[in-house]
Amino acid sequence: MSYQCAICHKKAMRGNLVSHSKQRTHRSFKPNLHKVTVILAGVKQSLRVCTKCLRRLKKPFVKKEIAEQVKAAVPLKQEMAKMPEETKVKEVKVKTTTIEELMKETQVAEEKASKDEEEKKAVKKTATPKKPKKSAK
């Protein structure tokens, strides 16, 4: 089991520990995880949850939303045990784009941006001019 929050998927990060002399050594920043027992679909399940998500779990109006996220993120242990090995592996299809498709997308985006700029200029021209302030003498 990786050192990761079950709800927000916060992971350990790598960084440098910088001393006074600016000498750098490697270190890791780990999330503050706690083991929590949660009831999902009538089944008790223990999850590793970060403190931010733990605080959100305690709020009554957020419980339903987080429960739906956890159901989607963490499969139930009983269902995984019942499944045959063939169905546990999922195929992931990746959409590949060609350079021509990317060029078309950028051209469309540039044309849209130029039309928006022209519309803004037209709106500014048609706007009523401000009256000059009268000087008090």
Image: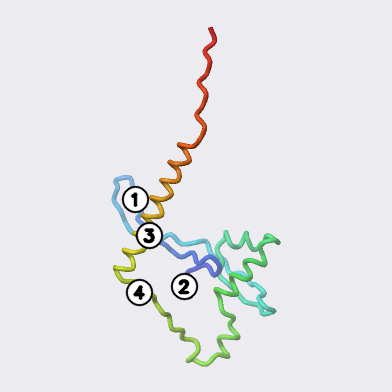
- Say which of 133 and 87 sits in front: 133
Mark 1–mark 3 distance (CA, rounded to whole Å): 46 Å
The mark nearer the N terminus, 4 or 1, is: 1
Residue 2's label in the rendered image is 2
Mark 4–mark 2 distance (CA, rounded to whole Å): 30 Å
Are there few (<14), some (14-19), or many (20+) residues within 10 Å of tag 2?
A: few
Q: What residue did someone put label 1 on?
A: 18
Report the amino acid beneath label 3: Val
Q: What residue did someone put label 4 on?
A: 96
The mark nearer the N terminus, 4 or 2, is: 2
Q: In the image, what residue occupies the spot 57% across and 59% down? A: 52
Mark 1–mark 2 distance (CA, rounded to whole Å): 27 Å
In the figure, residue 15 lies in which quadrant?
Answer: bottom left
Secondary element at image label 4: loop
The mark nearer the N terminus, 3 or 2, is: 2
- Say which of 111 and 24 sits in front: 111
In percent of width and height, residue 6 lies at 54, 70
- Say which of 80 and 13 sits in front: 80
In percent of width and height, residue 4 lies at 49, 68
Secondary element at image label 1: strand
The mark nearer the N terminus, 1 or 2, is: 2
Are there few (<14), some (14-19), or many (20+) residues within 10 Å of tag 4?
A: few
The mark nearer the N terminus, 4 or 3, is: 4
